Amino acid sequence: MDAESVRAEVRAWLEANWNPEQSLLEWRNKLADSGWGCPTWPLEWYGRGLSPALGEVVNEEFEKIGAVGTPGGGGMGLAAPTILEHGSDDLKRRLLRRIVTSRDSPRAPSSRPTATSSS
């Protein structure tokens, strides 16, 4: 695929699917199902199998329309690439979609008291 065909395809998909009124979870499920959220990932793991350069084309189109992408942070930046590279298929099946959709977003710190020593 070349850059212009990727640009046209993602633009058409975004025009048909992006709705800023839908819930973030619903949107991120669409991203996982379509592969547009992680376009450089393998097809079988919520991606499109595109090169990094074509992934940048996809990002440009998301920015132009103002569409939200996948979550940032350690899940997408560290855990997901590590799982893709070294994880078993079972691990990929259990975790990658959850990371893409932010299904398991970090929770607030516990409000339970911690043990402290008294002086």
Image (cartoon, rainbow, N blue to C red):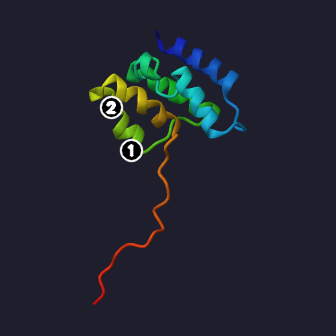
Q: Compared to 93, does 119 lie above or below?
A: below
Element at badge 2?
helix
Which-is-in-front pick, marks 2 and 1?
2
Q: Position of residue 26 (x, y in %)?
A: 63, 34
Q: How many marks?
A: 2
> Visible in this render: residue 52?
yes
> Looking at the image, is 52 positioned above or below residue 63?
above
99 to 39, vertically: above or below: below
Residue 74 badge: 1
Q: Quadrant of the C terminus?
A: bottom left
Residue 83 badge? 2
Secondary structure beneath label 1: helix
Q: In this orientation, does residue 50 appear?
A: no
Left or right, 41 with respect to 86, comes to right
Kind of residue indicated by mark 2: Ile
The residue under the point 55% across, 18% down is 7
